[in-house]
Image (cartoon, rainbow, N blue to C red):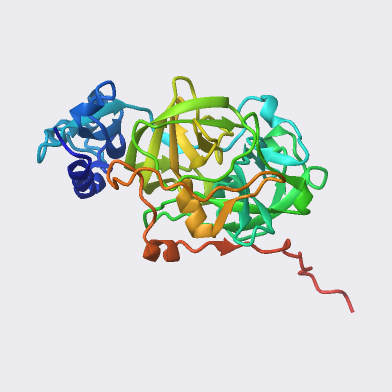
Amino acid sequence: MASFRRAYLLKQRIAGKMLRLNGVHGVGVGLRDPKHPKRGAAIIVYADTLSKAAAAKKNKSPRTTALPRYLKPRAGVPFRIVRSPRFCKRSGNGPSTRFTRRIRPVVAGYSVGTSDSSGTAGLIVSDASGCERLILSNNHVLVNNNTRRFSATVQPGGADGGTVPKDRIGQLDRFVKLSRKRANYLDAATAKPLRRSLLRPAYAVFGIVPGHVRSYKVGDRLKKVGRTTGVGTGTVESIHTDVQVDYGDYGNLGTITFKNQSVIRGKRPVSLEGDSGSVWLTSKGNLAAAVNFAGSENGMLSISYPIEWFMQVFGTRAAKPASGRLLRAQRGKSNRFICIRPLPAKLVKSLRPITASPRPLRRHATAKKAP
């Protein structure tokens, strides 16, 4: 029986090469047999059918080699293939739901975005002092094409009819820039409201979020509300998962790599267009656990990162409700290989958020006046 430690160390060695194989979208660590957890850990490979990989080899694709030769157990660690379409970001114009309507004050779970597209307001957070309220969501939901240019935040988002100035509630505050050249860890941004009273520290359907967890493990059950899929539940299928995510023409990024993500599986779609930014909560206690930013094309898999990483990088916490107390971050299990891990201090420093421009650029006349 393979331990999670052995599986994690093997994944660290082979993930980079495997992600270059045609049809492979992610490599992580999970259970060898989810129905029998005591059978130990395995390397989880998210991929298209093997026949596609074999066909690509025949066509001599630049991103190919025979996948099967990678699937022989190594150091006693087995592999488990999970058939999956490619992964892609999840902002856009999915079908309208009850969570696409205008709501004031804004609570987590509803449509938010720019005048061009919609995602989800994942959580209402505050700075360390607790005085300032902010919206937590994704870079590709709140940011102007992965740049620090001024970006108005509207609720509902543009895909749901939100316009400026009628529906403007604030503007982009800070964000982590996404990169084509280096590995990414979180797709994250905050929006600052025009007035503090425009945001209410609550979560649609589930009510108050009294804090967040610093750790969760494979097999944990979570729940969330997303702009498109509404109320949904999922199970953590793999962690420490390196994935390739297609951002299309957003920021001219194309397909980029994220490291050590969590893959959460729903029994029905949990990550469709418009669900980007939605926050997973623990099934009991309503504690924030993970931030959804991408998913498989069929929506059955959510690609998420631990919300603890967001709190580390942005120096934030769940916003305190008007009544009731705010819990300290819950540590969860101590086993660092079967559970997600906080970001090392050095990495947190390298992911320092960028502050957005506080106002739109003025257009200067280029033509000179006639004398």
User: Can you give x and y, in whole percent of width and height, for residue 153 in the image?
Assistant: 70, 48
Which quarter of the rendered picture does the C terminus lie within?
Answer: bottom right
Q: Residue at x 53, y 47 (%)?
A: 250
As drawn, 228 above or below 319: above
Of residues 279 and 245, which is closer to you in this image? 279
| Image quadrant where residue 225 sits | top right
As drawn, 269 above or below 60: above
Side (left or right) of 78 relative to 89: left
User: Can you give x and y, in whole percent of width and height, for residue 105 in the image?
Assistant: 76, 41
User: Can you give x and y, in whole percent of width and height, for residue 278 in the image?
Assistant: 56, 38
Of residues 317 and 53, which is closer to you in this image? 317
As drawn, 226 above or below 332: above
Side (left or right) of 353 relative to 304: right
How many numbered marks, from 0 up?
A: 0
**Residue occupying the far bottom of the picture:** 371
**Residue occupying the far left of the picture:** 75
User: Can you give x and y, in whole percent of width and height, for residue 122 in the image?
Assistant: 59, 41
Side (left or right) of 78 relative to 288: left
Which quarter of the rendered picture does the N terminus lie within?
Answer: top left
Residue 113 showing in the rendered view: yes
Q: Residue at x 39, y 35 (%)?
A: 263
As drawn, 72 above or below 325: above
Side (left or right) of 42 relative to 267: left
